C-alpha cells in the first residue's frame, strides 16, 4: 500500500490552487459549452512546465530511436504512461486528473483523448518522422487531437461493425465513412482515424488500418459540438469523410497483430484512467455532502445527525477508499513498469465508474431539492459521472472482457 508523498501533495496543492484561480471562475462557461477547454489546458501545461517536460522526454526518446541499437528497444518498451505530461512521474500524471475531475471532468476527457489516445497511438505505431510531425504538438498541447473509432452503426461492436473504408488507389488511399461521439472532434487539428482496407474481402474479415489526418483536408468535415447530458466541458462531434486522399506517409504501422491490437492497447490506457477520474468526482461529492450535512438543518438539528444521512456518507467514504486503492495500485504498476491487462483495466473501470455514478446520485439525494439545482455542483457532477459508465466501453462491455479472461484460464 502506498500513499502520496510530501512532494506529491505539494504538486496536488499547487494544481488545486491553479484550478481554484483559473477553472472554477469559468465553470458556467465550460458547462454551457460556450468556452472550449483547450486554452485552459494549455495554461495548465505552461504553468507547471508540463509542455517542456513532454518536449524534453519526447526529444530524448526520438534521439534514442534514431540511433537504433539497444537504446531503441529500451525506448520502445518504456512504460506507456511516460509519453504523457509527467514523463513517467505518476503524481504528475494522476494528480492533475483527480483534481480537475473534482471540478470539470470533461476537461480531463478532452486532455486524455488528445494525449493518451491520439498522441499515444502515434507514439506506439508511428515512425520517428510521423512522431515529430504529429505527436509532439499533441503532447505539448500546441494542437488538439482526436481518436476516431466509434461509428453510428457499430457502437460496442467497434471492429466488426466498422464501415469506414480506405481503398488503395495508386500511391494513395481514398478514405470514406463517418464517425460519431468523437471527443475533440469539432476542434481537432490532428485525427487518428481507424477504418477497414477495402480489398474485396468480407467486411468483417478486412484489415484495420490507422491513418493520421489533419483539419482542413479535402473531403473531411468536422461537425459542430453535439448536445449531450453531461461532460459539457469536453466537446464531442461527428466526422464525415468523402473521398479523403491520404498518402502512405499518413498510414501508421499496425504491428504484428494489426490495427485492432493497437486500439485495444489504447482501451487499456483509457479504462485504467477512468479510475482516477472517478476518484476526483467521488472525493468532491463526499466533501460537498459532508459540508452540507454539517450546515443544513431540519427539525432543529443538522441533517448529519440523522442515521440515514450518516449511512449515505459512510457508503461514499467506502467507495472513496476502494477507488483510491485502485488508483494507488495503478501507480504501483506504473512505477514497476507493468501495464494492466485489458481485463484488469476493464475491472478497474467497471467498479470505479459505477461507484462514481452512485456516489454522485446519492449526493444529489442528500442535497434534496437543492441537489437538483444547477447552482449546487452535485447536479453537474452527477451528469458528468454517468458518462463514465458509457464511454471507453459500456459497463456491459467491461463485464464481457472480465468474464472472457476468467473463462479462458
Image: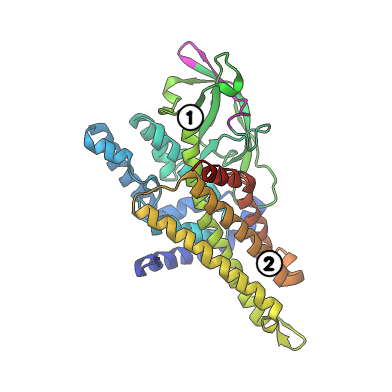
Instruction: Give the magenta-colored segment's residue range.
Output: 159-172
Pick out the residue farthest to the bottom: 300
Q: Secondary structure at mark 2?
A: helix
**Real-space Cα separation, disc 2 to disc 1, in angstroms:** 41 Å
Kindly identify the residue that appears in the image at 60 percent across and 21 percent down. Answer: 203
Write down the quadrant of residue 89 in the picture: bottom left
Q: Is residue 241 left or right of residue 326?
A: right
Residue 84, visible in the rendered structure: yes
Kindly identify the residue that appears in the image at 57 percent across and 45 percent down. Answer: 403
- Provide the residue designation for mark 2: 362
The label shown at residue 345 is none
- Provide the residue designation for mark 1: 259
Q: Is residue 92 left or right of residue 316?
A: left
User: Is 98 part of what is drawn in magenta?
Assistant: no
Pick out the residue farthest to the top: 170
- Viewer-side residue, 347 vs 294: 347
Callout count: 2
Kindly identify the residue that appears in the image at 43 percent across and 58 percent down. Answer: 329
Q: Secondary structure at mark 1?
A: helix
Amino acid at each position: 500500500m502506498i500513499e502520496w508523498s510530501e512532494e506529491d501533495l505539494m504538486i496536488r496543492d499547487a494544481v488545486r490552487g491553479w484550478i481554484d484561480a483559473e477553472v472554477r471562475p469559468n465553470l458556467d462557461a465550460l458547462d454551457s459549452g460556450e468556452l472550449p477547454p483547450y486554452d485552459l489546458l494549455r495554461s495548465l501545461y505552461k504553468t507547471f512546465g508540463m509542455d517542456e517536460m513532454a518536449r524534453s522526454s519526447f526529444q530524448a526518446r526520438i534521439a534514442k530511436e534514431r540511433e537504433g541499437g539497444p537504446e531503441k528497444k529500451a525506448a520502445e518498451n518504456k512504460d506507456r504512461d511516460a509519453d504523457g505530461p509527467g514523463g513517467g512521474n505518476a503524481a504528475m500524471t494522476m494528480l492533475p486528473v483527480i483534481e480537475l475531475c473534482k471540478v470539470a471532468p470533461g476537461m480531463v476527457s478532452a486532455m486524455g483523448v488528445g494525449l493518451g489516445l491520439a498522441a499515444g497511438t502515434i507514439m506506439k505505431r508511428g515512425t520517428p518522422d510521423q512522431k515529430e510531425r504529429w505527436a509532439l504538438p499533441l503532447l505539448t498541447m500546441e494542437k488538439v487531437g482526436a481518436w476516431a473509432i466509434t461509428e453510428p452503426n457499430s457502437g460496442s461492436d467497434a471492429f466488426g461493425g466498422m464501415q469506414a473504408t480506405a481503398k488503395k488507389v495508386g500511391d494513395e488511399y481514398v478514405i470514406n465513412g463517418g464517425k460519431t461521439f468523437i471527443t475533440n472532434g469539432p476542434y481537432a487539428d490532428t485525427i487518428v482515424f481507424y477504418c477497414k482496407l477495402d480489398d474485396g474481402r468480407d467486411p468483417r474479415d478486412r484489415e484495420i488500418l490507422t491513418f493520421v489526418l489533419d483539419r482542413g483536408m479535402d473531403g473531411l468535415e468536422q461537425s459542430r459540438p453535439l448536445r449531450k447530458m453531461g461532460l459539457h466541458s469536453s466537446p464531442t462531434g461527428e466526422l464525415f469523410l468523402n473521398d479523403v486522399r491520404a498518402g502512405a506517409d499518413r498510414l501508421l504501422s499496425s504491428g504484428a497483430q494489426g490495427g485492432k491490437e493497437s486500439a485495444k492497447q489504447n482501451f487499456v490506457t483509457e479504462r485504467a484512467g477512468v479510475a482516477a477520474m472517478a476518484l476526483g468526482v467521488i472525493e468532491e461529492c463526499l466533501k460537498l455532502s459532508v459540508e452540507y450535512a454539517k450546515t443544513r438543518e431540519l427539525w432543529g438539528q443538522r441533517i448529519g445527525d440523522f442515521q440515514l444521512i450518516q449511512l449515505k456518507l459512510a457508503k461514499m467514504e467506502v467507495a472513496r477508499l476502494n477507488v483510491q486503492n485502485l488508483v494507488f495500485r495503478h501507480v504501483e504498476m506504473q512505477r514497476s513498469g507493468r501495464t494492466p491487462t485489458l481485463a484488469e483495466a476493464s475491472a478497474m473501470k467497471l467498479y470505479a465508474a459505477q461507484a462514481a455514478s452512485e456516489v454522485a446520485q446519492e449526493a444529489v439525494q442528500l442535497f434534496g431539492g437543492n441537489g437538483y439545482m444547477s447552482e449546487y455542483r452535485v447536479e453537474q457532477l452527477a451528469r458528468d459521472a454517468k458518462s463514465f459508465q458509457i464511454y471507453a466501453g459500456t459497463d456491459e462491455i467491461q463485464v464481457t472482457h472480465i468474464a472472457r479472461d476468467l473463462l479462458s484460464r
